[in-house]
Image (spheres, coloured by chain):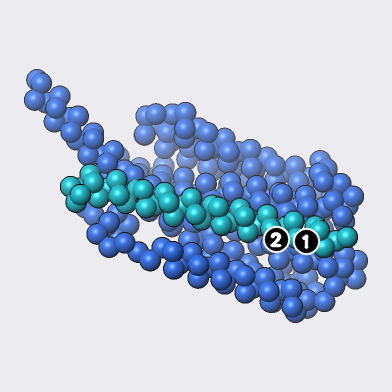
Chain colours: A blue, B cyan
Amino acid sequence: MVESQSPDRVTDVSTAPARVVWVFAILAILAATQAFGFLTSPPDRDMGHLQKIMYVHVPAAWSAFLAFVVVLVASVLYLWKRDDRYDLLAASAAEVAAVLTALTIALGSIWGRPTWGVWWTWDPRLTSTAILLIIIVGYLALRGFVDEPERRARWSAAVGILGALNVPIVYMSVRWWRTLHQPQSSPSTVDPAYAWGLRLNAIAFLLVMIYLVRARYRAARLERIPEMAAEREALSGSVKDV
Amino acid sequence: MSDGYIWAAYTLTWVVLVVFMRTTVRRVRRAENAARAAKGER
């Protein structure tokens, strides 16, 4: 197991970053892109103004998928390099992926009620997304149950890879099976009137996702410093006892 | 009638993102303080 000993940009606590400024800047961008979507998109022929829910539901889903990609890459790198930092990165991305996946399902449910007439149905897209959420919640629960760090990292990397491999199934489910859900929304498949609103909101959600993964990874790295100090103290105490 | 669903979707989005960002910022601040203490920079 490789453990970084020297302070780096992530664990350097001597300079406090302007965290709040970043949070407000990202939220301001999100508000601006949502306002753009509201002001520039005409009502949809079938859904009317309900189409506006696309600007939060679809970007939330894409950001969740990207967070799963981070989990996949970091988990594979952990199994290959056995570096704790990849495990912490995977865990940070998994926390964000869990929240964004739950948000995607909730927003889809709110959108589904007036358009399909139901809050939930066992449709392939909805079911595969629910399975994705269960896997990532299981990943986080597993991390809480296993105390031994090396085993926890190995097992959670396996579950993280399994969860991320479900993402292409979720994405393609609307093509592979007969489903209530519309085909994948993207700037190339939606009406041109909605394309820029979707693009900009996706960028804003991407910024939120990147900020959250980075900040939580930084916190996870910093949380290791007192743990390592306590371990060193315990080790030196036991050596003195001998 | 559709307005209520749109409001619900956007309100939920903002509540979830703001709360999650807020807890993240607090976690970073706590971790920084603990790390500073462990490094002896009290």
Amino acid type, mark 2: Tyr
Locate residue A2, reporting x and y percent: 28, 44
Looking at this view, is A203 or A175 the one in front?
A203
**Quarter of image, res A234:** top left
Q: Is residue A128 left or right of residue B31?
A: right
Instruction: Tell which residue pokes out farthest to the top in this image.
Output: A242
Tally of numbered discs: 2
Q: Identify the amino acid type marked 1.
A: Ile
Answer whether labels 2 and 1 touch (C-beta < 8 Å). yes
Q: Quadrant of the N terminus of chain A?
A: top left
Q: Is residue A220 above or below residue A39?
A: above
Q: Quadrant of residue A44?
A: bottom right
- For mark 1, does the 10 Å Cα neighbourhood hold few (<14), some (14 to 19), or many (20 or more) residues? many
Q: CA distance from mark 2 to mark 1?
A: 6 Å
* Closest to the observer, A91 or A211: A211
- Other-residue count near label 2 (Cα within 10 Å), few / some / many at <14 / 14–19 / ≥20: some
Horizontal arrangement in the rendering, residue A164 relative to residue A83 (left or right)? right
Q: Point out which mark residue B6 bears.
A: 1
Q: Which mark is residue B10?
A: 2
Dot 1: chain letter: B
Give whichever of A172, A145 is nearer the camera: A145
Q: Residue at x 73, y 57 (%)?
A: B9
> Residue A93 at x, y = what percent?
50, 50
